[in-house]
Image: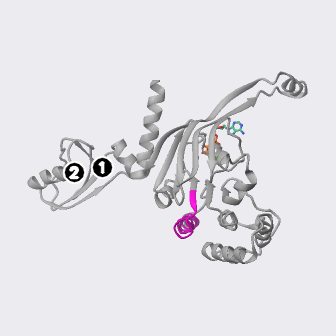
Amino acid sequence: MSIIRVNEAVKVFRQYRRFPGVIGSLRSLITREYTEHTAVNGISFEIREGESVGYLGTNGAGKSTMIKMMTGILVPTSGVLQVMGNTPHTSRKKNAQEIGVVFGQRSQLWWDLPVEDSFDLHKHIYKIENKRFHDNLNYCVEILGIQEFIHKPVRQLSLGQRMRVEIAMALLHEPRILFLDEPTIGLDLFAKDQIRNFLKKVNSERKVTIILTTHDLKDIEEICPRMIIVNKGDLVYDGKVSDLRTQIGNERKITIDFRHDIGNIDFPGTILVKDQGLRKTFVLERGKESAFEWVSKIAEKYPVEDVSLEDSDIESVIRTLYENLETTSINE
Ligand SMILES: Nc1ncnc2c1ncn2[C@@H]1O[C@H](COP(=O)(O)OP(=O)(O)OP(=O)(O)O)[C@@H](O)[C@H]1O
Ligand SMILES: [Mg+2]
């Protein structure tokens, strides 16, 4: 069952022209000249309950704008958005009960209050029943390791600590969907891992649907089997990482250990990218020949000790996609 439906969503921002100086600001009020910018250009997708989806795109692609429309913060210019059957911006209160939201770049916590008081306030605002509140709090505090700084005011927390609190807070009212806009931005490797593991756990144990934006592709690799990629407001990919790899047809790397050095030899259809004497790494173009056929041929002629095959990583797959998009838009 689809828990989120987005059909031809469009968001056009109007930017009013500002003239400098005092007279200028008066003039800005009178003339109201504006330019328009389409941040989301007719995007459609559906997300099923329990899915974990990565929303990707370069800076300014329209990711945060889409998250804000799905969470009811922004009103779409046109198109239909439904989150658990509700239109987010018209039923903000009802929607707020069903969703949790985390913005990596902006805190939703009370800066001067101790963490535990922030949690308590959240309990009252969302009218969370006592037992449910304590069960959920204990679950999050324990797994995210919040106990050691639960008495500290939020402003004294490190970024990694604060982000853990933000995520815990977003889950206290047991939302069915969790939206996260760059939850791992600026965090160290350990904090990132901790948050990824927690999100994976929440998704698998509690069946919370997760939609997250990120520039760290490891987040996607670890948490999101499905990714939606947007570019300049358009949807350019919706599917699995592995399927994109096949579609883009990136090269594969083959590393061969020879029993003795065969010297600097070129093989057709491949490029020697690393030569460490006995160990040589080749890049094989996809589609020309299967890796197996190629290695068999080499092994007939040369003393092959060991072979390892490496598919291109997610980063190079996505980079190729972006590069392809750039060249198509230049040619247009
Ligand atoms: N309130 C606004 N008024 C005018 N333009 C806006 C507004 N918010 C966003 N934009 C513009 O819309 C486009 C998309 O912005 P958005 O914040 O959705 O990008 P993003 O994909 O989240 O990028 P990033 O990876 O940098 O966070 C940008 O060109 C941005 O300048
Ligand atoms: Mg953004």
Q: Which is more toward the observer, 266 or 82?
A: 82
Query: Can residue 49 be seen at all in this image of the molecule?
Result: yes
Horizontal relation, residue 150 to residue 64: left or right: right
SS category of the residue bearing label 2: helix
SS category of the residue bearing label 1: strand
Q: Position of residue 32 (x, y in %)?
A: 81, 24
Q: Position of residue 166 (x, y in %)?
A: 69, 63
Q: Which residue is mark 2?
A: 291
Q: Are marks 1 and 2 in contact (CB under 8 Å)?
A: yes
Rendered residue at 75%/54% (across/down): 93
Q: Position of residue 305 (x, y in %)?
A: 17, 63
Horizontal relation, residue 176 to residue 239: left or right: right
Horizontal relation, residue 305 to residue 189: left or right: left
Task: Judge whether 105 appears above or below 133 on screen.
Answer: above
Rendered residue at 61%/40% (across/down): 60
Residues rendered magenta in the picture: 191-210
Rendered residue at 66%/55% (across/down): 104
Q: Amino acid at mark 1?
A: Arg
Ligand 1 is within 8 Å of the C-beta of the residue at disc 2: no
**Picture disc at residue 131:** none
Rendered residue at 62%/55% (across/down): 179
| Among the 4 quarters of the image, the one containing residue 206 | bottom right
Q: Which is more toward the observer, 310 or 302?
A: 310
Q: Which residue is mark 1?
A: 252
Horizontal relation, residue 106 to residue 52: left or right: right
Task: Judge whether 259 appears above or below 251 on screen.
Answer: below
| Residue 162 part of the magenta-drawn span | no
Query: Can residue 275 be seen at all in this image of the molecule?
Result: no
